[in-house]
Structures are given as structure tokens and as C-alpha cells.
Image (cartoon, helix red, strand yellow):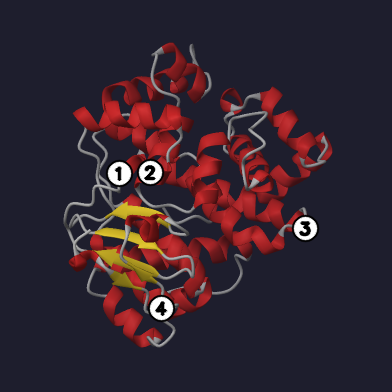
Amino acid sequence: MPEATAKTCANCKKVFSTEKDFLTGTSQWRMCSLENLWFDCQCGSTLMLPKGKYPWYAPSLNMRGSAQGIFNKIAQTTDLPHIPSAIMELQMMLFNKDIEISELVKAVKKDPFLATEIIKIADNQKNLRDPDPPPILSLEHAINYIGRANLKNLVLTAGIRFFKLPTDKFSKEAFWQHAFLTAGIAEYLAVKLGLSAEKDQIYLAGCLCNIGKIMTALCFPQECDKIQTIIDDVKTMTTWENAENFLKLPDHCVLGEIGAALWGLPPFVIECARYHHTSEFPEIVDHPNAISVVSLANLLAHWINLEPHRINNKKLKYFAQTLKLNDHDLEITARKLAPLKNALSV
């Protein structure tokens, strides 16, 4: 490997110079819009390799067998978007404790859209937790409210919201409304079930568990619009899974694994994207609690949005039983959280 690609982590001082160095203990590999390669060191800091050829890296690095095969086919015909480089640079800054909040604010303000998105993300989190305090209006307040560690991954959500979708019927706004509602329900369930230590991870996983639908919109826009037409038609209203099966499209859960890995989302998000509709996921998963909570939250979001045709009742019952919740618990939860859908900024 050329010496130019050698890298030293500024935080933990680990030296990366060989293929083994780069692929051991690292995570969240992703390429930005400028085609630079980014990854997270095992200490949590974000590092960047400038645009170049790295034969030991492939976007399918963290995808399982079936996802790798589908990705390789998609990559031949679809130019998939990458996270904007400004997001990656912000991630790097957020881990550096020597950088003051004022410097972070100044860096974010260079991109007005990103600044708006961060305030929206913070305001949604606040509204989901407590709708009474005044809204978050400043970047400094937003960054302090979310916290640097959580914002480091949450800004990837903002990056994905940058993507332009070539669809007519599939609504990006409706997708994100459901996503943020699922996130709020997932966080509420995490706290209720005594998983408070994982609530921030579960919030992010809930928000992005359906990222496979964004992949469907990007890779199969016409078919994605057909799915939306099928599930909206009063004569054919059904679940997204049934519609994509009818059209012989790739499972959005597998596409979710592809998108989550491609865009450098954390491993627990990849697992939730892949298994959030799976009643019995493999024992090899590292975050079974997160998967169960996110899966139930996704179904409860359809409940709150008055979309009973989009609920697989068998899976709803399965995930509720897995989390030791009965029908009464579900009804109370849905009633309590129903106001959330009107508190979201999409």
C-alpha cells in the first residue's frame, strides 16, 4: 500500500498503514460526495482517506451474502448518491472535544440546509420527549440539546434527507414523518422497558429502519410509485411487503441493509434495517433488543397514523410478546403517543 494512504488517529494514536490495520476494529466505512473515503476508528473518531484507489475496500464490505449479490447488480445500473462531504467533516469535528461549540456552529452555518436540518432534528427530539418547553431556534441550543456523541450519527439522517428521489407517488415527506414518529415511539418503549442506556441508539435505528424504501425509490422509482399506488388504493390497500412481493422487487429490508452499509450507518442500524420485519432473526445479531423495539415501534406508527392495512397483526403480536407487552399495553401506548404525529417538523 502506498505510504500516502498511511493514517494516524489523532485521538488514540493508532497507526493505519496496511490492509489489516484498516480493516481491523474499524466501522462505518462510507464514501462522501467528493469520493473521499471515511471510516470510524475503534476509539470512535472519524478519519478520512483522500480520493484514490483502495483495492482492499468495497462498498459491500459490511453486507451479508444476499445483500452483496443484490448490491452488485444494482451498482451496474444505478448511480447511488453519497453523503455530502460537509456531513463527514462535521462528524470529524464533533468527536474533537478541543473544538468549541461556537466553532461547530460557524462550520455548520456554511451550509444553510444542514443548519436547518440539525435544528429540525433537535426540535423533533425535544417535541417527542416533552412538547411544553419553547422550540429550539439556534444551532448552539440544538447541538447542546442533542449532544455531540449522538449528533455524530444523527447528522447522517440529515445527509440522507439531502437525496433527491426520482418518484412522483412516493412522498419523501410522508416517509420522514413516519420515520420520526417511529423513532419517538421506539425511544419511549426503550425507556418504558428499562433500556434507557440504549435509547439514543434505538431512536436512530427507529428513524432509519425503513431506509430500504429510500433505496427502492432510488433504484426502482417507477416500481416504488406502483407500490405507493397499491397501498393507497382503497380496493388494494395492503402492506408494503405484500406490494413489493407482488411486483417481484427486492425486499426493502435487504435494500435497507445495503443502504445502511453503503452510507456508513452504525452496525445496530444496519441490523434493525435488515431484520425489522423478521419474526425470528438469527442468533448472530448483536442488538436483539433494539430490533424488537424498533420493529414494534414501526408497526405502532402505522397504528397511530390510522393505517391498519399496513399492520401485520401476526408480527405485531409476536414483537409485543417478545417485549412482554399485552394488548392493553399497546392500546395505552398508542393513545399516549398519538399527539406525537402533530408535533413533528418534517
Q: Secondary structure at mark 3?
A: loop
Give the total number of marks visible in the rendering: 4
Label 1 – label 2 distance at C-alpha: 5 Å
Q: Amino acid at mark 2?
A: Leu
Q: Amino acid at mark 3?
A: Gly
Label 3 – label 1 distance at C-alpha: 38 Å
Q: Are marks 1 and 2 in contact (CB under 8 Å)?
A: yes
Q: Secondary structure at mark 1?
A: loop
Q: Which residue is mark 3?
A: 194
Label 2 – label 4 distance at C-alpha: 24 Å
Q: Earlier in the sequence, mark 4 or mark 1?
A: 4
Q: Secondary structure at mark 4?
A: loop
Residue 58 — which label?
Answer: 1
Residue 13 — which label?
Answer: 4
Report whether 178 appears left or right of 248: right
Dividing the picture into quadrants, the one containing residue 63 is top left
Please, is residue 111 above or below residue 156 in the view? below
Q: Residue 318: where, in percent of width, then height? A: 74, 30
Label 4 – label 3 distance at C-alpha: 36 Å
Q: Which residue is mark 2?
A: 61
Q: Nearer the viewer, residue 46 or 260?
A: 46
